[in-house]
Amino acid sequence: MVLDFRLSVGSSSSGGSSTGSPSQTATPGGTATYSLAIAPTNGTTFPLPVTLTVSGVPAESTVSITPAAWTLTSSNPWTWTLPANTPLTSNVQVSIQLPQSMALAQPPGVAGGKLAARLAPFSLALLQIPFAGRMRKAGKRLGRVLSVMLLLAVGLAASAGLSGCGFSSGYFGQAPVTYTIQVTVTSGALSHSTSFTLTDE
């Protein structure tokens, strides 16, 4: 009879930069894989079904686990079940694949997130519109070429802000966002939780 069970987390990475730790960093489209040790304190199987729930993942991410004995029952939140009396012969691998674009993916409770960071330069460019008339007059005095170059610079700044321009930091870049992933494992009246972190760049 299972008196209790233990739950602990480690990690390995694919497209991330951390190994052997419950904290990982991955880029959009990358995958972070965490290793969960789930085992009864008495014996090798659970007499009742086991439910594993993963919550707090970035929006539009895909979560999968192995071994195949676990059956996906929900993706909101991500939930799997293990039939009663199924031997757990290896750790459970939880893989989180980030979406290709993280522009709209925000952690719970963060207003604006990366979208605000991307739109900030565009907003700055919009503030230049009331001064466009003065810029044109100044352009006539300084020459048409200078005026065109100035307007082109404003346009490039706005474009860089919307596209991210490949930078991962700085004014036109995207600040890394860290998510706290919660894992809860339940069997009958027993329930244990642990957490790990995932940072997208």
Image (cartoon, rainbow, N blue to C red):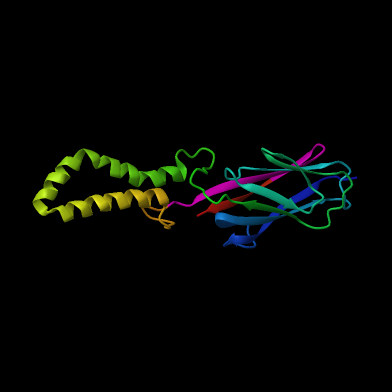
Residue 87 seen in this snapshot: yes
Q: Position of residue 168 (x, y in %)?
A: 44, 57
The quadrant of the picture occupied by the N terminus is top right
* Residue toward you, 2 or 132: 132
Residue 22 seen in this snapshot: no
Asked whether residue 178 is drawn in magenta, I would say yes
Q: Which residue is located at x 56 percent, y 57 percent?
A: 25
* Residue toward you, 126 or 39: 126
Judged left or right of residue 18, residue 6 is: right
Q: Which residue is located at x 8 percent, y 50 percent?
A: 141
Q: Position of residue 191 (x, y in %)?
A: 76, 41
Judged left or right of residue 135, residue 11 is: right
Judged left or right of residue 191, residue 30 is: left
Asked whether residue 104 is drawn in magenta, I would say no
Q: Position of residue 178 (x, y in %)?
A: 53, 49
Q: Which residues are magenta?
A: 174-193
Task: Decide: is 144 above or below 185.
Answer: below
Q: Main secondary structure of the magenta part?
A: strand
- Which residue ends up furthest to the left in the rendered image? 141
Q: In terms of image quadrants, where is residue 9?
A: bottom right
Q: Which residue is located at x 65 percent, y 62 percent?
A: 20
* Residue toward you, 4 or 20: 20
**Total count of labels:** 0
Judged left or right of residue 115, residue 189 is: right
Q: Position of residue 135 (x, y in %)?
A: 16, 45
Q: Which residue is located at x 16 percent, y 40 percent?
A: 133
